Structures are given as structure tokens and as C-alpha cells.
Amino acid sequence: MKGFRMPRRTGRMPRPLTQLLRGAALALVAACGTTYQLPDSGGVHTEEARRLFAEARREPARAPLSAGAAQARFNRVAPRVSAAGRQYCQRLTADRAGFNCNVDLAIDREMAERNAYFTYAETQPTIRISLPLIRDTASDDEVAFVLAHEYGHLIGRHIEKQQQQMLAGALLVGVLAGVATATAGDYDGHAVEVGLGVGAAAGSIAYSQAYELESDTLGTRITVSAGYDPVEGAKFFARPEPTRTAAGRYSFWGTHPPDEKRVATVLATKAEIDARIDLRPVQ
């Protein structure tokens, strides 16, 4: 619609744009939130996390597992985490008709870097972990926690929310571009298109912190349910590794940033489990 001229209105935003802006802002806020309340990870949990984080980073380098030992570790851990994750997912999503908790969990044989991820293969929930990542683990607990963390992305509906954020972010910045050009007296369709692109990118960036912490919270509970130690498992995240691979792609540490807050979240969640405090939905 480039060239379409809006009526000039001095000091007043056109009503349709005002309504769109309000709607876009509300949509973006709604899409950003977690499904469940995160535990209070401050105080004693923060102090203990600092100690564990520093301790994990001081551990000497060790030789990776052989491919056979890594495969055996996966074969031991994956069925237990899969069963616990499916049971936990079914309980938490009982009110969501048609929610698929049957995850296809396997090793990604094509992935050369150390990584793990959750995605959908069409409509099939899918978790993949690379053999190099398993070879780098120090215990079954670490593999269990990584897999359980990825289950958290399914239960938290993080891919769906990320898509909503991208759309809401695109709409919000696009509307702002429209407001700016309309208020100046000229509606510039190109500026709106550019704004939509920038907004989509901004919306997707908001994915990491809250959703990763929610996945840590859910993953801690699934790890315990599967019979593993999430605190030992979370030490895997303290490894000092580059955020990008040699090929320039984000590594596991680039998409799952290692920091003390994440370890503190695991500790706080484990304390809630010990106190028999269940997950609390965000009101």
C-alpha cells in the first residue's frame, strides 16, 4: 500500500492504530510468560549454586567416553526418562485435549557437535541428543537431566509460545512503524514491512531466559521421577565451553547458557520436591 496517504492528525494517533498497538502489546506480554511459576532461587540456593558452579568448573579435563560406552549410557537412561517424562506430561496436560506426550527420543547420528534439542517432526514431538554430547558426560545423571530438560520445552509449549512471540513482536513493531509514518502524515507501507521483520526477530530473541529456567524446573522434577539426581545432572551446564561451533553454529552452550542462576533454579526446585511442593500454574 505504498503511496496511500493517511489524513494528517496533529498530536493524535489514529484510532485503528491505537487499538492495534494495544492488542499487539497485550499479545506479546501474554506470549512471553511461563506456564508455571519458577521457584525462588535466591538466598541459600544462590550461595550453594555458586559453590557447585565453581567446583564443577575446577574439575580436571577427562577423556570422553567411547562410542560404545556412550551408546550404553543412552540405552540405560533414555527409557527411564522417556517413561517419567511421558507420565509427567500426561498429568500436567490432562486438560489439553489432544496434547501429544509421546516423544520420539533418539540419538541424532548426523550431528557432529555436542548438542541436544526439542522440536517437532511435522506434529511428532521429538528429542534428539548427539553422541558427542553423551560421550562428554560424566554420569548417567547428566544425560538424564539433559533429556529431561528437553521434555520441559514440550510441557511448557515453548515452541508454540516462541511462534506467538514472533508474530506478536512483528505486529507490535509493524504497528509502531505505521504510527510513526501516519502521525507524520504519510503512510509508508515499506516502513511497516521493515518493522514487521524487526519485530519478529525481537520476539524470537525473548525465548531464552524464562523458558530455559522453566525447562530446568520441569526437567528437575522429571529427573527425580526417573530416579536420577538433578543436582549432579545440572553440573553439566557449568562446563566452560564456546557458544559457537567451529562451523559458526550455536553450540549447546550457546542455546542453553550456563550460569549460576540455572544451577540455583535446580537446587530450589529440588528443595520444593523434598518439601512436597508441587508445580504452581502462573495465575
Image (tube, grey):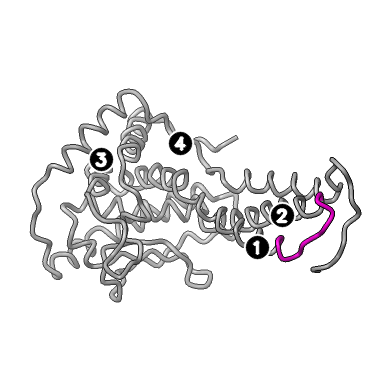
The disc, 3 or 4, on the residue closer to the chain's N-terminal end is 4
Mark in the foreground, 1 or 4: 1
Please say whether residue 187 is one of the residues in the magenta stretch. yes
Residues in magenta, as a range: 183-192
> Helix or strand or loop: what does disc 1 sit on?
helix
Residue 82 image point, x, y percent: 35, 58
Residue at image location 38% in from the left, 63% down from the top: 127
Distance from disc 1 to disc 4, alpha carbons, whole Å, reads 35 Å
In the shown orientation, is residue 220 left or right of residue 11? left
Q: Which residue is mark 1?
A: 194
Q: Which residue is mark 2?
A: 177
Please say whether residue 55 is one of the residues in the magenta stretch. no
In the displayed structure, would residue 68 be above or below residue 211? Answer: below
Residue 231: numbered disc: 3
Q: Residues within 10 Å of mark 4 (few under 14, many from 20)?
A: many
Q: Amino acid at mark 3?
A: Val
In the shown orientation, is residue 151 left or right of residue 231? right
The disc, 1 or 2, on the residue closer to the chain's N-terminal end is 2
